[in-house]
Image (cartoon, rainbow, N blue to C red):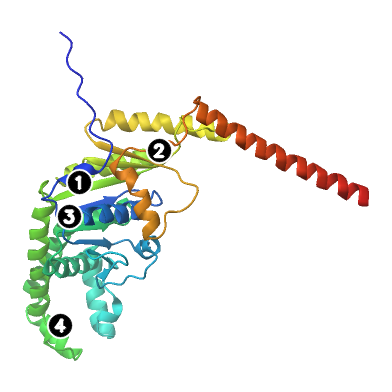
Amino acid sequence: MASEEVPLPEGTVRNILEQETLKWVFVGGKGGVGKTTCSSILSIVLSQVRQSVLVISTDPAHNLSDAFQQRFTKIPTLVNGFTNLYAMEVDPKVENDELPNDEGIDSFLSELTNAIPGVDEAMSFAEMLKLVQTMDYSVIVFDTAPTGHTLRLLQFPSTLEKGLEKMMSLKNKFGGLLTQATRLFGLGDEFSEDAMLGKLEGMKDVIEQVNRQFKDPDLTTFVCVCIPEFLSLYETERLVQELAKFEIDAHNIIINQVLFDEEAVDSKLLKARIKMQQKYIDQFYMLYDDFHITKLPLLPEEVCGVQALKTFSQHFLTPYKPALTRGTVKELEHRISILKSQLNEAESELERLKKGKQKA
């Protein structure tokens, strides 16, 4: 008896919109694959079904402002044209000017941050999460930095754990020396060892609480964005493996910049590119047969501004179909009209050249 073939999951992001319990949506992938466009559009479509949405960029490049063509800061700002969509851009490291400009304490803190790589990012991320949790958004979309940074972001709870252990060992080792050092440098109580430990402890609580939420598939999902090329396929596989290691749910892949074979393409170069892309698209479907894979077309222009984002968002909800399919009457008529206009252009160019030669 032949086993029934399991149908492929729908190639859209509707499953994310239908999961009403979702609180955190991460969008990540290799640099330059269109993460910001995808996270902006995801936040737009979510705003249509949710009470309030916040999209946060943790990428130092900060392209959210470019995508929406509106200036954003580290304070959530209402996106123009919306009543329930907010955006903010966060630097994933502690600003130096937030610390007293004193060489002594600077060197002490840099010693601590050097001892635990990423502790400054972890602290700033914890501060941001603390801030976000005090606001009442029904869903939060993270436009994350390229893959390596994203994975560091997921390691923050253990990073802070190490930071605390280091602080505790320093406290046990040097006793009151830290307190004396802060007095010596003329710093107030906020830089005493207890205040620092208290701050780290507070952050650790927030991060642990959030980490529990991140590992809950009802509350958190990760959307991987890629393009149909070898390096992007490799990076996506690495990301999916790491997410599984961190027990973070991922069941959506967006393949961006796809050239569709059905479209009328006469260029040999583009035909070769379509063939190459198809090879990797087939591999994506083979590797991730239980994922929702959304294919987005390569466009002749950038998707910038609210209107362009809204227009493009339709391909997130219904699979993209090329306007013209090869071999149809409509497609042949379209090709004939293109050839006619090219012929007219060539004839007028020839006329111009002839006139130019006669004048000479």
The residue at the point 38 percent across, 60 percent down is: 67
The residue at the point 25 percent across, 43 percent down is: 13
Q: Nearer the viewer, residue 188 or 270?
A: 270
Q: Secondary structure at mark 3?
A: strand
Residue 16: give its label: 1
Count of residue discs: 4
Quadrant of the image containing the N terminus:
top left
Residue pointed to by mark 4: 191
Q: Secondary structure at mark 2?
A: loop
Q: Nearer the viewer, mark 3 or mark 4?
A: 3
Q: CA distance from mark 1 to mark 4?
A: 44 Å
Residue pointed to by mark 2: 228
Residue pointed to by mark 3: 24
Task: State which quadrant residue 155 falls in.
Answer: bottom left
Q: CA distance from mark 4 to mark 2?
A: 50 Å
Q: CA distance from mark 1 to mark 2?
A: 23 Å
Kind of residue at disc 2:
Pro
Q: Is residue 250 visible?
A: no
Q: Mark 1–mark 4 contact, CB under 8 Å?
A: no
